[in-house]
Image (tube, rainbow, N blue to C red):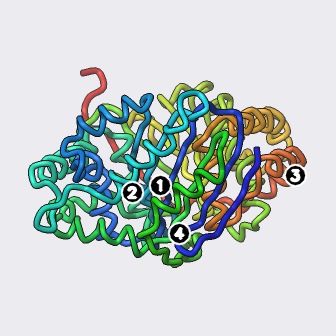
Amino acid sequence: MNYKKIKKDNYTLHLINTDRFKEINVSINLTKKYNKEEAVYLKLLEKVLISNGTKKYRKLKEISRTLENLYRSDIGVRFTTFSTNMTFELKLNLINPKYTTKEMYTETFKLFKEVITSPYIKDNKFEEKNFELEKENLIKSIMNIKDISEVYGRIKFEEIFFKGTPYEDNNYKNIELFKQIENEKLYETYKKLFTDYKIDVFIIGCLEEKTLENLTDDLLKNFKQTINIDNVNIKIKNKETKETKEQTEATQSNLFLGLTIDNITEDEKNYTAVLYNTILGRMNNSVLFVKVREDNSLCYSIGSSFNRYTSSIVIDAGISKKNYEKSLELIKECLKLLEDKKEVEKNIENAKKTLDISYNDYYDNINKIVNYYYINEISYLPSIEERRKRINEITPEEISEFAKKIKIKNIFLLEGVQNEEN
């Protein structure tokens, strides 16, 4: 795999040349500082941009038919938020032209450009019926979140644990902003894609590099890049442990614990925290899984996740409300256990093997490869092989000492009030 970075006046091109894939993936990542009001509009634009149709292809089915004729190429749009930033991603997937015809490059990029730069617009608005339909469907899908207890529980927990950061925002919380979206303002938001973002283009596959560079230059010739990416690290204030409960019309309850890490170093963030979290709750026989689920049958599911941008760990478990106190007690015991070097010694080699296997998947996963280079445009992330090497060197003493830095900041229970027997 060969990586090349080319800085242009109006964007940065990342060419990842590899023969591991028969397809070519093009990702245009438009990134800027997170803004709640604009994020709401971008979330709807994610739905509207392709379904709206273009000047040439007035209906979505015409675009779909053209993509089908181009050997089932695909165009997608995705909006995401992470840390202090938000990204609007425009994607093109096509079969490598060496398996079809040379014209594939030109024809797919022509369609990609049409969708991105020439949506059907009348009176400074997107197609009105499509706009209203997509807005209604989006609002319905957001409102339905409350019926999915594990999803609703997590967003309510994050409002508490990540208070004062972009992570406390969510679609459900901002539903009134979605209801107020106006078509004209959506078009104004769309036009900002051309002027207000840091622009990175990632192309991965077995590439004709110069051809793709020229096609990308043409595709983005009317875009202007703005560099305004802030520090992506967020500090969560570690106050006294706070316990919160909310009831919901469900049988299962969902328990969340938010853990902060005192004085975490860059080495710990990149390596130690990852291995610690794998031992705690990311592998099949993790300490949490064995102690709470296997040995005591107190939960339906349990696991943990580490967030490098906030230097925090979240434990989540699906439980019966009657098991809340006992489950919480055992989770706290698990956290204490990992301060013991002997307990870590029982689990560390299996955790290293788990991570080693997961790292092997990186080389066959287009999204993971692109995401690695994208993250490194914004903050430093060691390579897979650097991570593999350093993690294999970590000792039980390092993990047990790291465990002593862990503090519980928030405990949240979304309590299912319906009788499980019914």
Q: Amino acid at mark 3?
A: Glu
What residue did someone put label 4 on? Answer: 240
Of tags 2 and 3, the one toward the viewer is 3
The residue shown at (61%, 61%) is 13
Q: Which residue has dot 1 on it?
A: 411
Q: Residue at x 42, y 32 (%)?
A: 70
Label 4 near label 1: C-beta < 8 Å? no
Return the mark for residue 397.
3
Residue 105: where, in percent of width, then height? 51, 43
The mark closer to the camera, 4 or 3, is 3
* Residue ID for mark 2: 244
User: Element under label 2?
Assistant: strand
Which residue sits at x=76%, y=37%? 351
Q: Earlier in the sequence, mark 2 or mark 3?
A: 2
Q: Position of residue 370 (x, y in %)?
A: 61, 49
Q: Is residue 276 left or right of residue 161?
A: right
Nearer-N-terminus badge (3/1): 3
Disc 4 to disc 3, C-alpha distance: 27 Å
Left of 286 or right of it: where is 121? left
Q: Residues within 10 Å of mark 3 (few under 14, many from 20)?
A: some
The residue nearer to you, when weighing 207 against 332, is 207
Depth check, mark 3 against mark 1: the one in front is: 3
Residue 299 coordinates in the image, percent (x, y): 49, 31
